[in-house]
Amino acid sequence: MFLLYSNRGERHFGRKPHMPIHSRKEWAFQFIVSGECSLCVREGGKVREQRLRAPVLVACGSEAMYAYRGKPQDVCNIIVFHFDEAYFQLRHLLGRTGWRVAPVRAVDVRQAVLWYQRCQTAKKKNDVLAPLVYNIVALELTLLLFQLLPQQEFGVAADFTTSKVAEAQAWYQANLARGLSIQEVADAVHVSVTHLRRLFHKVRKMSPQEAFTQMQFDRVKELMLDGVSTLEQIADAAGFESGSAFSRAFKKEFEVSPKVYRAMMRSDISSSKVKAAFLSPTR
């Protein structure tokens, strides 16, 4: 899970031209800290407008069609976080096209400021711990939303199979750098290795190892694109047992060695095949 965008400050959503209603392909949390504005959401071909009075928290799925607008005199302060992915519980609550608005307290706003500052610090340091910070903030935001919403909005609870797979993936993600074995993950979520494999094949149509390898390469993508981390640091952060194991796995997945790919990045040599393979979701 990666923080794609974060910001805070004063906004004048009522000024024209209005932002078009569109999906942002990101999972968004936006605090309206002070002032007023309107949330316009397109649902089933119709636009629904909801007036927002601070302080509130708005959460939107990655394919939700929405825009913030307002009256000419509207002024508000916001804190916003956009993530490339969402925790299973949030995906289950919103779906990709859904959204929720929840009133927040002053203490929640103060906490949001701290989360924003933590993300900014991690971004400036640009170290291997930054993705972990983003994961923690995303989890805290998800927990806050669930605490603020009434129970009846949660809908039907996810079935055991899906939730257990999500739990296993969350555990692996949180301990990615340790290079956990399938046995360790199974022990952590209190199922046998055989049962864990059965659950993953039912939900993800793949083995746990294949799913975990995807998560490793998701981390690799984050770190390779920053242009700062060494290949050894990337291997450690993504949980590979050695630099050579990382290089072999990388070449098998992307059909080019990590050293060659980095050299291509630095020399601006274009290769649509390699770039498309690297930037697209792992198999």
Image (spheres, helix red, strand yellow):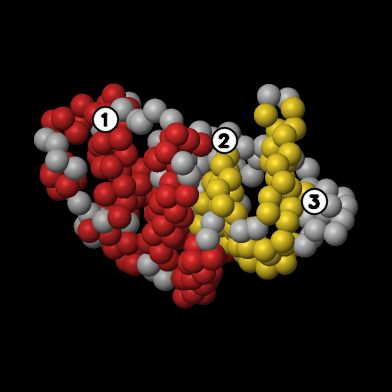
Question: Residue 281's x, y, as percent?
Answer: 47, 40
- In this orientation, which residue lies closer to the viewer: 166 or 79? 79
Q: At label 1, which amino acid type do we have?
A: Phe
Residue corresponding to mark 1? 160
67 vs 162, left or right, is: right
- Mark 2, other Cα within 10 Å: few <14 / some 14–19 / many ≥20: some
Classify 152 as above or below 222: above
Q: At label 2, which amino acid type do we have?
A: Gly
1 vs 188, left or right, is: right
> Can residue 21 be seen at all in this image of the molecule?
yes
Q: Residue at x 43, y 46 (%)?
A: 146
Residue corresponding to mark 3? 70
Distance in Å between CA atoms under marks 2 and 3: 21 Å
Distance in Å between CA atoms under marks 3 and 1: 43 Å
Sequence order check: which comes first, mark 2 or mark 3? 3
262 vs 213, left or right, is: right
Q: Residue at x 57, y 35 (%)?
A: 98
Q: Are marks 1 and 2 in contact (CB under 8 Å)?
A: no
Distance in Å between CA atoms under marks 1 and 2: 23 Å
Classify 93 as above or below 73: above
Q: Which mark is residue 98?
A: 2
Q: Quadrant of the C terminus?
A: top left
